[in-house]
Image (cartoon, rainbow, N blue to C red):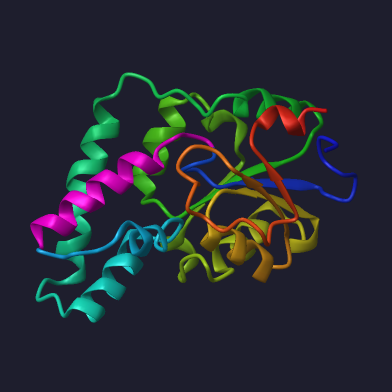
Amino acid sequence: MKLIPDNFNAVIFDMDGVLVNSEPFYFEVERQNFEKLGLNISDEEHQTFQGTATDLMWKRLKTKYKLPHSIPELVEMTNSIVSPYFESLENIEPMPGVKKLIQLLTKKGLPLAVASSSYPDVIALILKKTDLKKYFSVVVDSQMAGASKPEPDIFLLTAAKLGVSPEECLVIEDSTNGIKAAQKAGMKVVAFAGPGSEFQDQSEADWVIKDFEEMLG
């Protein structure tokens, strides 16, 4: 595909599974937490939460499985492992090819943003340790937006902060929930079929790529 069609004036990146290969790590942390709570959750059900905020995942599981814990307690089970893990890393490698794409988009003068369901401290850590922070003028998390993906709030807020209309934005996502959210916002979507996206339905995306090199042509 052409790098970016002429009718797009901004590009919005998801973080987990797009900028970095972090989805397998989250999946394993959550799986361990499910076991601690005695929850028998299939991989198929687990994959339906990919791309959503941690608190939304726990709200749904608390309701379905009648968990006695509070949502903050459940969220802390995840964050108490995730944040220290990323903090302990000296640096984090970006997804292969994504930095080159970001640099080319920057040279074209397109404003770039991150719209992620991760928590603010984790987003900040990953952007810092991948050395990608300097390329993004706007960073939005689901706490800022209110509703999590698959609702469109996070993408609509990101577009507003970029100063462009939703129709002018191209989104790069990997999860079913993220793709749905972007399309509800009226944005076109490139689905990245990278590691960790094997169980995600990307069929509704406008384009699907397996390698960021495909966007450099």
The front one of 172 and 12 is 172
**In the rendered image, which quarter contains the N terminus?**
top right
Quarter of the image holding residue 183? bottom right
* Residue 53, position as x, y percentages in the image: 39, 60
Residue drawn at (43%, 61%) of the image: 52
Q: Nearer the viewer, residue 107 or 13?
A: 13
Q: Is residue 97 above or below residue 56?
A: above
Using the image, determine if residue 177 lies above or below residue 68: above
Magenta stretch: helix, strand or loop mostly = helix
Q: Position of residue 186 (x, y in %)?
A: 73, 67
Residue at 24%, 52% in the rendered image: 30
Residue 82 is left or right of residue 168, and the answer is left
Percent coordinates x, y for residue 193 in the rendering? 59, 43
Magenta residues?
A: 19-37
Q: As rendered, which of 7 and 161 lies closer to the eye? A: 7
Question: In the figure, 63 relative to 120: above or below?
Answer: below
In this rendering, the count of numbered labels is: 0
Across and down, in percent, residue 22 comes to 39, 38
The answer to if 20 sits in the magenta stretch is: yes
Q: Residue at x 81, y 47 (%)?
A: 9
Residue 47 among magenta residues: no
